[in-house]
DNA sequence: ACCTGAACACCGTTCAAGT
DNA sequence: ACCTGAACACCGTTCAAGT
């Protein structure tokens, strides 16, 4: 009886679910992304989600894509190393602006469109820099690993400095200047990569 | 009535619990380390564990220490970069020989003795190489991140190649030679670090 | 001092049944 | 086609009670 384009206005589809999960992430962090909680947020029962998504793994991959959606690309005119530097900083800003964003990325495989596009574009930068395919692949890997893992560690330090508001620091355990640390590692990496371009 | 050194032979103490958890890790992987499963393995009820450990987080940190226990240190006579290369390979071997070992390390903070000792010794290598404290700290960080994260990615690829036994590879998605990739990244990193020594 | 029973407050996932 | 009720098989943790 009910035809397809009737305004049954099914208020539920995959993108709505991903959006809800993304909001949970922003407000409460990775561990709070729960099938049950996302369902509740949408006003439905948790079992219903399984009509629209395969499982939690898939949902997390879609959330990861959401995180990668808004990352801006560097201007092509710059040197490859300047492009990579700019992009790394943009990426870090994005990952720090969304709670636990790096956790989501590290826990999921890059299977979704925006994320894949991101990887391909970075790959292209290495190729354009004059690397052969093999080295470009390895370099991209190193680059990826560095950024994501650094933020992961950064979360830990941010967590520690929040949990211990001793005001006057314990001096022997110096809390590092994360901004500086990040640039140092990035610099080191790019220095090394320069050598790999024949 | 019962004195302390009576042979009540309480067959349970913290090290036994850690050992049991470590065995679960080796046999079934990270996700199988469960308070309930560890308890069952020891023939006791899960509530009993809480007399000997604070919580699961602490248990995992102790398991992480167990992983770091057997890592051999490089001979001091070599160059700093050769020491770091040797050690990285030793570490990788260790992490690959224990299922999900890198996951445990990445999920826990370095709070335990063997692990801290490891970090301090590596720190010393950077200091001996002529770095100032700040750079030594950053370099150690980069080095740590690289090794652990690489293995984490390596697990994923090993998983993929196991799950898809297509025998004749799909050719367009080339399965990387992890050994080579690891050396490449390590090399790149060490190259870059060389520049940082004044 | 050490261990247990029993509960609490959660999970992800499935599936027959409803509309 | 889509959603629900109700269950299954799990979690970590607590705590009064036992010995």
Image (cartoon, coloured by chain):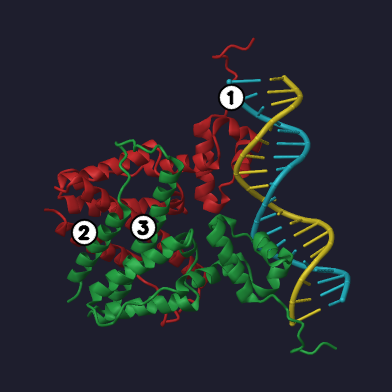
Chain colours: A green, B red, C cyan, D yellow
Q: Residues within 10 Å of mark 3 (few under 14, many from 20)?
A: many
What residue occupies the far top of the structure in this picture? Answer: B1
Give the Cα separation between the discs numbered 3 and 2.
18 Å
**Residue at the spot 28% in from the left edge and 69% down from the top edge:** A85
Question: As rendered, which of A37 and B12 lies closer to the eye?
Answer: A37
Mark 3–mark 1 distance (CA, rounded to whole Å)? 44 Å
Pointer 1 chain: B
Quadrant assignment, res D14: top right
The reply to whether residue B187 is visible in this rendering is no
Q: Residue at x 29, y 36 (%)?
A: A172
Residue bearing the label numbered 1: B10
Give residue B121's position: percent from left, percent from top: 26, 41
Q: Using the numbered discs, state the Cα–Cα distance from disc 2 to disc 1 in whole angstroms.
A: 50 Å
SS for callout 2 = helix
Q: Nearer the viewer, mark 3 or mark 2?
A: 3
Of label 2 and label 1, which has the lower sequence position? 1
Q: Is residue A197 above or below residue B159?
A: below
Which type of secondary structure does the marked residue at label 1 adopt?
loop
> Mark 3 highlights which residue?
A150
Q: Is residue B90 above or below residue A110?
A: above
Relative placement, left or right, of B194 versus B67 is left
Q: What x and y, as percent, mark residue B95?
A: 39, 52
* Tag 3 and tag 1 share a subunit: no
Which residue is labeled 2 in the image?
A: B190
Q: Nearer the viewer, residue B39 or A40?
A: A40
Looking at the image, do the residues carrying marks 3 and 1 touch, with CB atoms under 8 Å apart?
no
Q: Are marks 2 and 1 on the same chain?
A: yes
Left-right relation of A58 to B195: right
**Element type at mark 3:** helix
- Taking depth in this image into account, of A138 and A96 the one nearest to the observer is A96
Q: Report the side of A71 relative to A30 (left or right).
A: left
- Please give the name of the residue rendered at 15% of the width and 59% of the height, measured from the top-left corner: B195
């Amino acid at each position: 009886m009910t035809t397809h384009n009737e305004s049954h206005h099914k208020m539920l589809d995959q993108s709505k679910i991903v959006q809800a999960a993304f909001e949970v992430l922003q407000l409460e962090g990775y561990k709070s992304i729960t099938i049950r909680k996302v369902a509740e947020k949408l006003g439905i029962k948790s079992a219903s989600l399984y009509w629209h998504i395969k499982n939690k793994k898939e949902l997390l991959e879609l959330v990861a894509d959401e995180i990668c959606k808004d990352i801006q690309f560097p201007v092509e005119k710059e040197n490859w190393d300047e492009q990579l530097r700019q992009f790394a900083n943009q990426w870090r800003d994005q990952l720090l602006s969304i709670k636990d964003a790096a956790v989501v990325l590290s826990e999921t495989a890059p299977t979704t469109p925006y994320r894949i596009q991101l990887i391909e574009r970075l790959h292209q930068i290495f190729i354009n820099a004059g690397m052969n395919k093999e080295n470009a692949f390895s370099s991209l890997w190193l680059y990826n690993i560095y950024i994501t893992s650094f933020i992961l560690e950064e979360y830990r330090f941010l967590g520690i400095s929040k949990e211990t508001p001793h005001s006057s620091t314990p001096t022997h355990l110096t809390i590092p200047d994360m901004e500086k640390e990040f640039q140092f590692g990035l610099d080191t990496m790019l220095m090394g990569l320069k050598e790999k371009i024949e």
